[in-house]
Amino acid sequence: MKHKYGFVTLLLIAVAFAGYCFTALYVGSREKGEERFFVVTSFYPMYIAAENIVGDAEGVTLTNLSEPQTGCMHDYQLTPEDMKLLSRADVFIVNGGGIENFLSKVAKSYPDLKILDASQDAGLLEDNSHVWMSVEKHKKQVENIARGLCKMDEGNREYYEGQEEAYLLKLSKLEEEQKEIRSKIQGKSMISFHEAYAYLAEDYGLHVAFTLDLDEERQVSAGEVSDVISALKENDSAVIFAEELYGSEMAETVKKETDAKVCFLDTLVRGDYSSDSYLSGMEENIRLIKEAYGVE
């Protein structure tokens, strides 16, 4: 009986060892293949844009520097793990416009690393790098990413160009929806609780009556509350655009004093890694804006 149990034990060990060897061989070969061209993006909206270009391109690895719930990169501090990741990268795709305030450190540490600025010639608003919030300007970012990857990875050029064409078509459909709404609400007023919404105001032709840029560290004064209420009274049909995470408390305060409509809109800097997340997020923003302004 002891011999029988001993044999079974040896057999299980042998099976486990064989499985381990096979797994190690598979993972090793997969990683080796992926390492041919290694793409790193700075944060969520850049990852989603790049994901729609990279797709299943042969031999390409795409990864994101920050976690998908990080949000904007204004105050982001690079970690040792980030630097290690960038040391392996062939290209680093960034939004640009100053939102990644650590770029000089990256360029100094890795002078041979190619940095692809997605916002080049995209038409940034002054001192406002949230350009992905404009569908029209985000299309330019996608084009920049696609063309940059085509130059750096010639072997996948045709594939990238096909991916670019397909994704731009989807974005163009969103843009057409926006233009239809713009024709009905252009010139109306909005009050912004986040600087990212300046791009929405531009896309829809809205008048920005007042801006109060809120984030996790922003302390709102009584005077600023009074200014918002005054702006609402002077623009009685204005809609407040706010991010629910940081703007809900202020919105509730204002609603107690006025009958203002509040539209909680996604700034599209957080989410899962679904390739359609930008499309679905912006589609929901469009629906909410239509509802807030009474567009049928």
Image (tube, helix red, strand yellow):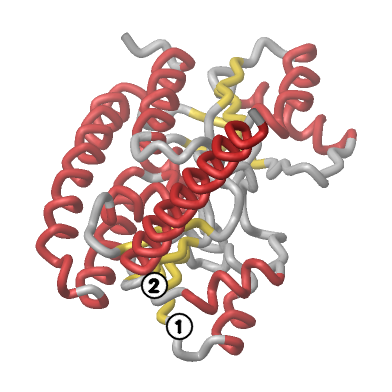
- Of helix, strand and loop, which one carries label 1? loop
**Residue at 25% of width from left, 40% of height from top?**
171
- Residues 150 and 194: in front is 150
Left or right of residue 267: residue 165: left
Q: Is residue 90 above or below residue 247?
A: below
- Give the label on residue 116, or none: 2
Query: Residue 153 occupies which quadrant of the picture?
Result: bottom left
Amino acid under disc 1: Leu
Quadrant occupied by the C terminus? top left
**Residue at 51% of width from left, 51% of height from top?**
17
Within 10 Å of the Cα at label 1, are there few (<14), some (14-19), or many (20+) other Cα atoms? Answer: some
Amino acid under disc 2: Leu
Q: Which residue is mark 1?
A: 113
**Residue at 50% of width from left, 36% of height from top?**
272
Q: Position of residue 94 (x, y in %)?
A: 47, 65
Q: Is residue 164 above or below residue 271?
A: below
